[in-house]
Amino acid sequence: MNEQTILHVEDEREIRELVGLYLKKEGFQVAEASTAKEAFQLVADIEPTLILLDVHLPDIDGFEACRCIRQTTEAPIIFLSCKDSEMDRVIGLSVGGDDYVGKPFSMNELLARVKVHTRRYKQLQSAVTQEEPSSERHILRSRSIVLDQKRYECYVRGELVQLSPKEFELLAFFMKHPHQVLSADQLLQSVWGYDTVVDTKTVSVHIGNIRRKIGDDPKHPRLIVTLRRVGYKFDADVY
Ligand code: CA
């Protein structure tokens, strides 16, 4: 697929038209939905490269919609909302969103983020589809965890665990750097690849998600240990 299609889910026509105009000028194809239900159908039909998702939709709450969409695609999801509070950001990221832009937003900022995420998604797609000659190279192992970097699958004691793409990349980064103290800034730069869009709170949210999903005790984590004011450390041997 050469063309990159952005699905814009927004019930306000004026915003849809304005954003659509800019995206098309940048060479993107644009599909539009005004309700979450329309969006579900389009995600299945056109397999968008990226999804812009309004938090306030007439039929289903945007966060709930995100959860549903995440079950069928790994395409990046950027939330758009006027409720630009820390709480919303945290919820947005914990339901599988990749980024969050508060309304009113500058079109340049939105375009910059769309480009960052589509580029990364394309890289991810080509990495997944490329045939790897040695089958073991894309497998990362610790005592109880196996990551298949080709399929983006995580197994804990043989059980498949669903991680979002970012959670997966973060855990993979930890597994490649065992016993090293990694600061939140370091993790942001290495895993997210840019430092202006998300802040270090994002890192702690994702680490919390990983702990919960792999069954590590969030109060007394053993696998990814928090070192106050310093960072995090992955301790593969104990888990
Ligand atoms: Ca709305």
Image: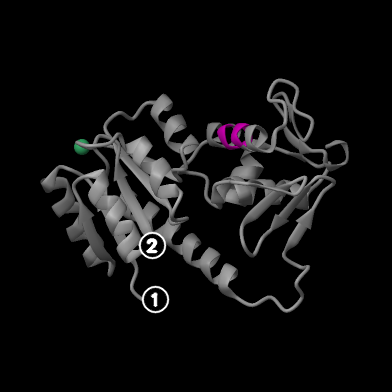
Q: Are marks 2 and 1 in contact (CB under 8 Å)?
A: yes
* Relative vertical location of residue 91 with respect to residue 144 in this rendering, above or below: above
Ligand 1 within 8 Å of disc 1? The answer is no
Farthest top residue in view: 219
**Is residue 164 placed above or below 88 in the rendered structure?**
below
Residue located 12% across and 47% down the image: 13
Q: Which residues are magenta?
A: 205-209
**Residue where numbered disc 2 is placed:** 49
Q: Amino acid at mark 1?
A: Met
Residue at 64% across, 32% down: 212
**Residue type beneath disc 2:** Thr
Q: Residue at x 46, y 37 (%)?
A: 95
* Number of residues whose C-alpha sits closer than 10 Å to that of mark 1, classed few (under 14), some (14–19) or many (20 or more): few
Is residue 130 depicted above or below 231 in this figure?
below
The quadrant in which residue 118 appears is bottom left
Label drawn at residue 1: 1
